[in-house]
Structure formats: structure tokens, C-alpha cells
Image (cartoon, grey):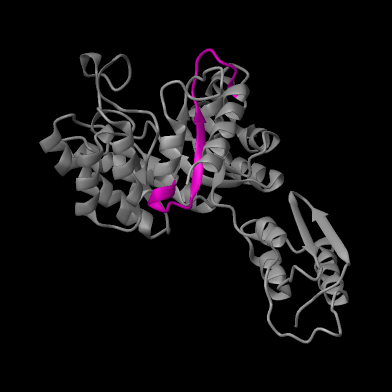
């Protein structure tokens, strides 16, 4: 059935606009309208309002039929395709982007889902170290219950959890490693309960490459085995020390060879050695090519962290070529969330988040 008419109708709800235009030049696939309406990436809740709108879509489309046109071919108009097809990428907000707000004496990290929603995000990435005070005061169970309530209240999804300060998974002492694995497990349980697909872990313990390859493989394998029972990924970020050496990281992950043990490539974080051997502080040695590092990590990526620290007058990140980074992400075929992680001790956090978001959108529009 070819639908042809001068009738025009449009239905708008939430952040989605469904437009169907029928004329002699453009044809509409009604089945595709219904499919995308019901099953697209926004996961619409079935309210009476939306059911009514679906009925209106079907009714209006049927009304467009031209009785004199009996052709059976169906197609999608360009406008409808642009409106309803799944976007090429999705953005989430890493909680560390607002770390100064939440670390303040009056900070309220449990309000992150609300704050993120107000900034235009439907997906968030939690940072465990920002809840240390709340966990101590309220207890772990209460904190997780509170986060679950906030996520549901504000219609926000938890994409992943960045886990810090739960022990060194690559410590040369197996007893210490095993203790770290056990400490991480509660966050795997929390990720499962909150609907996240992954936990991001650190791989500190030693900066000796030969020892690290053995110890980190052991720690990650043990943790990933537990995570697999919960359908959760364990992902390593380039987050300092040998985790910022992608060839070494990928060698270990290839040896582990588990579907739920992958990476979280971060556009920043390339320090492989710091002064006095500290985990954090002044960097004395960086991995030489961040773009090659990202390219190597992307095949096993379960997420991407878009780090930004400062911007020039044109809105470009001063040290990171975002156009080159986004092209690498596109070339890899990655389709998950890109997490905005703005970090600065001086620039306004909300301004930095918005500039990072604008830069990602611009880079996606201008790359192949």
C-alpha cells in the first residue's frame, strides 16, 4: 500500500517528535513507524497518553491513503527516518565532572541523578569515592537503596560505576589481591541492582611490567568470574601506572579472554609514572601517543570516557584533538555510551560539562 496525500500530521511528546508527511513524492512505512515507536532506544513507558498517540499515528497514516494508488511497495520518508532511527551515539555524565560540588562540606552526591537530569542527561556514571561519607553515616545498603530511588524518581539510568579505594587488584601479594577482589564484589552487586552494565576498576599494585602482567591477570580474572554470575562487566580504564600502557593492558586482556572483561578508554589519563612512585601527583612520564592508545583499547571497550580539562576560545579542548578521538571511536564501531568527564579545579563545572557536550556533538557532526 502506497500512502499518498496532502495531509500532514505530527505528534510530539517528551523529547521525541514523530512526524509523518504524506505526499505524492514521499512514502511512509507504517510498520516501521510502529516498530520504532514501541521499540526504539528510549524505552517508552506505556502510558495512556502514549497509547493514544500511537492510535493517532495509525489513524492519521491510514487517512493518508490514496484510493487510486494501488502499489504495494512501502518506504520511509527522509524526515521520518531522521526523526526515528537510533542515534549514532549516546551521552552519559560521569559523576567526577561535579566532584568539587559533591566533595564540598554541604555536598549531596545522592542528588546526582537529579542534577544530571537537570543538565539534560538520561544516563550517569557513578563514582564510589564520592559516597564515602554517606556510606559511613548511613550504611552501604541505605546508600544503594537511596540511589535506586533517585534513579527511578528522575528517570535516569545508571550506565556504569567507577570503583575506587577498594584495594589493589594487581598487588604482588595474593592475599592482598584476594582481599581486593572481595571488597569489589559489593559494587558488582550494586551495579546489578542499579541496572549498570559495568564497574570500572583500577589496576594498581606494582609498576613492574613483568610482575604486573601476572598479578593483574589473576585479580581481574577472579573478579570477572564473579561479575559474570551477575551479568556485569569488569572494565579497566587507563587510569595511571601500567593501566595507561595500552599495549600491555590489551596483552593481559587478550590472555584473560573473557567477554565481560574489557576496557574503558579515557581520552586523558596517560601518566605511566609519577614522582616518588605515588599513585597520584606530579607526572614524570606519559604514554607517548594517546591516539594510538585509544585505538588499541577500543576493540574491547564497554564504554568511552571523554575527558576534558580546558578549552580555547573556539570551544576546542586545549590538549586533546576531539575530532581525531571521535573519528577513532566511529572507526571502531563502538555504539555504547560516551561518558562526559570534565575535570578542572578552577573552571565552573557546569560550564565545562556543557562545553564538552557541545564539542562531542560538533565532532560527531564533522567527522566521517
Decide if residue 348 is on the left or right side of residue 255: right
Q: Going by the picture, which residue comes out furthest to the left? A: 210
On screen, 159 above or below 36?
above
Q: Position of residue 167 (x, y in %)?
A: 31, 34
Tell which of 332 and 314 is nearer to you.
314
What's the residue at 27%, 47% (across, down)? 220
Q: Is residue 218 visible?
A: no
**Which picture quadrant has residue 156?**
top right
Task: Count the numbered circles shown.
Answer: 0
Q: Quadrant of the N terminus?
A: bottom right
Q: Position of residue 147 (x, y in %)?
A: 60, 41
Q: Does residue 38 belong to the magenta stretch?
A: no
Give, as a single range, the part of the protein colored magenta.
330-349
Q: Is residue 325 visible?
A: yes
On screen, 44 above or below 290?
below
What's the residue at 52%, 37% (across, down)? 363
Q: Position of residue 109 (x, y in %)?
A: 59, 30
What's the residue at 20%, 47% (across, down)? 252
Q: Position of residue 272 (x, y in %)?
A: 24, 26
On screen, 171 above or below 13?
above
Q: Going by the picture, which residue comes out furthest to the front? A: 25
Tell which of 295 and 215 is nearer to you.
295
Decide if residue 235 is on the left or right side of residue 147: left
**Which picture quadrant has residue 106?**
top right
Q: Does residue 334 belong to the magenta stretch?
A: yes
What's the residue at 64%, 35% (across, down)? 116
Amino acid at each position: 500500500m502506497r500512502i499518498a496525500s496532502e495531509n500532514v500530521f505530527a505528534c510530539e511528546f517528551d523529547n521525541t517528535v514523530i512526524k509523518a508527511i504524506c505526499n505524492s513524492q514521499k512514502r511512509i512505512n507504517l510498520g516501521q513507524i510502529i516498530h520504532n515507536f514501541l521499540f526504539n532506544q528510549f524505552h517508552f513507558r506505556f502510558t495512556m497518553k502514549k497509547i493514544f498517540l500511537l492510535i493517532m499515528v495509525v489513524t492519521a497514516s491510514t487517512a493518508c491513503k490514496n484510493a487510486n494508488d494501488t502499489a504495494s511497495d512501502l518506504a520511509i520518508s527522509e524526515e521520518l527516518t531522521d526523526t526515528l532511527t537510533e542515534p549514532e551515539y549516546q551521552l552519559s555524565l560521569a559523576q567526577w565532572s561535579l566532584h568539587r560540588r559533591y566533595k564540598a562540606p554541604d555536598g549531596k552526591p545522592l542528588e546526582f541523578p537529579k542534577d544530571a537530569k537537570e543538565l539534560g542527561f538520561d544516563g550517569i556514571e557513578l563514582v564510589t569515592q564520592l559516597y564515602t561519607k554517606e556510606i559511613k553515616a548511613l550504611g552501604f545498603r541505605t546508600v544503594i537503596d537511596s540511589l535506586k530511588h533517585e534513579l527511578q524518581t528522575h528517570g535516569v539510568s545508571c550506565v556504569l560505576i567507577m570503583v575506587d579505594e577498594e584495594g589493589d587488584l594487581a598487588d604482588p601479594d595474593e592475599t592482598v589481591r584476594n582481599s581486593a577482589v572481595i571488597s569489589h564484589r559489593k559494587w558488582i552487586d550494586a551495579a546489578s541492582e542499579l541496572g549498570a552494565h559495568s564497574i570500572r576498576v583500577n589496576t594498581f599494585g606494582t609498576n613492574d611490567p613483568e610482575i604486573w602482567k601476572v598479578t593483574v591477570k589473576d585479580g581481574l580474572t577472579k573478579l570477572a568470574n564473579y561479575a559474570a554470575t551477575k551479568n556485569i562487566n569488569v572494565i579497566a580504564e587507563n587510569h595511571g601506572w601500567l593501566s595507561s600502557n595500552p599495549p600491555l593492558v590489551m596483552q593481559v586482556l587478550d590472555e584473560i579472554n573473557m567477554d565481560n572483561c574489557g576496557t574503558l578508554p579515557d581520552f586523558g589519563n596517560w601518566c605511566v609514572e609519577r614522582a616518588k612512585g605515588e599513585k597520584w601527583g606530579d607526572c614524570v612520564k606519559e604514554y607517548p601517543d594517546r591516539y594510538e592508545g585509544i585505538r588499541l583499547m577500543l576493540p574491547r571497550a564497554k564504554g568511552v570516557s571523554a575527558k576534558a580539562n580546558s578549552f580555547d576560545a573556539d570551544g576546542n579542548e586545549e590538549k586533546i584533538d576531539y575530532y581525531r578521538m571521535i573519528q577513532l571511536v566511529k572507526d571502531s564501531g563502538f555504539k555504547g555510551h560516551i561518558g562526559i568527564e570534565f575535570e578542572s579545579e578552577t573552571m565552573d563545572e557546569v560550564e565545562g560539562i556543557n562545553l564538552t557536550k557541545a564539542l562531542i556533538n560538533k565532532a560527531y557532526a564533522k567527522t566521517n
